[in-house]
Image: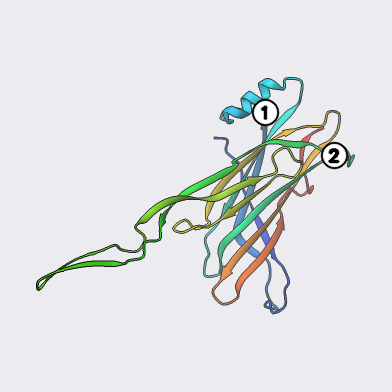
Amino acid sequence: MTEVRLHDVDLIPERTLGSPADDGPLRGRLTFGWDLLPAGHEGVPEDWLSYLRATPDREFRQLLMVCSFRPETPASRGEFRHASLGVALSTPEPEARPIARLIDPGERTRPVAGSGTGVSFAVTAGVLEVGMEKPPGTGPGREEWIVRGHGASQPNPQWEFRRVKRFPLVGDHHVAALVELVPGRVNTAEVLVAAELEHRSWGVRRYRARVAPPSHAIVLSG
C-alpha cells in the first residue's frame, strides 16, 4: 500500500437559521491526502489491469485519495454521521474533460447484526415453566455499506461515507479513480468534501471544505 501524506482540513459550517453565532471552522477532525500513481501500479484491482490491457492506446493515471475521520474531543464536539468526497476533473477547455473510467471501491460494507426483538417464549407444564428468551440483536446478520462510489465513466466521481451500527465513521478510508487523460492538455482534479456531524445540543450540522492543494487543483498531467 502506498503511503500517503495527510494534512489537516478545516470544515466550514453551513450557515442556517438558528445556528450558533460563534460557530467557527471545525479543526482537527478531518485529514486528507492524495497521490498520483502510474495506471498499472502494484496493487491495483485486477479489473483495472484488464481494462488497461484492452485500451493500450490511451493514457491513464491512478488518483489515490485518503480521507481520515477523527473522533470527537472535548474541544471539538460532534460525531460524523455522513460525508461525501467529490472530484471534478477538467482541462482548460470545457468541452475536453478527463474521465474517471473506473473507481474503487464501488461499495465497501460491514456486517451488521440483525435487530432481534427480545421476545420471550414459555411453555407451562403443571407448575413448571420452561422459558427461552431471544435477546435483542441476535437476528440474522446483514451487510450494510459504509463507503459507496458513484460516477464511473464520468468526469465527476463521488464517494459517500456513513456510520452504521457498531461502526462509527472514524479512521482512514482509501478511494481511487483510474483517470483517462485528455492528450496534450493540462489535466486537473478539484476535490470537495461535505460532512454531517451530529451534536448533542445542536442536532445535525453540515460542513464543507475544499481539500485540494494551495493551487486549488491536483495536476494530473501537463
Q: Left or right: where does residue 11 sit relative to residue 125?
A: right
Q: At 68% from the left edge and 76% from the top edge, which residue is drawn?
A: 19
| Three-letter residue code for mark 1 | Ala
Residue, disc 1: 39
Question: Mark 1 falls on what kind of element?
Answer: loop
Q: Could you tell whether 8 is left or right of 56 in the image? A: left
Residue drawn at (76%, 49%) of the image? 214
The secondary element bearing badge 2 is classed as: loop
Instruction: Compare marks 2 and 1 and give the one earlier in the sequence.
Output: 1
- At x 66%, y 32%, the residue is 37
Numbered mark located on residue 91 in the image: 2
Image quadrant containing the N terminus: top right
> Which quadrant would the C terminus be assigned to in this image?
top right
Q: Position of residue 136 (x, y in %)?
A: 35, 64
Q: Residue at x 44, y 58 (%)?
A: 166
Q: Quadrant of residue 97?
A: top right
Total numbered labels placed on residues in the image? 2
Amino acid of disc 2: Thr
Q: Is residue 206 above or below residue 108?
A: below
Query: Would residue 41 be found to the left or right of residue 154 on screen?
Result: left
Taking depth in this image into account, of 132 and 193 the one nearest to the observer is 132
The numbered dot on residue 176 is none
- Give the percent coordinates (x, y) of residue 15: 73, 71
- Residue 146: x, y in percent? 54, 51
Could you tell me residue 216's position as x and y percent? 78, 49
At label 1, counting other C-alpha atoms closer than 10 Å, the crowd grade (few under 14, some 14-19, many 20 or more) is: some
Residue in the foreground of this view, choosing between 5 and 180: 180
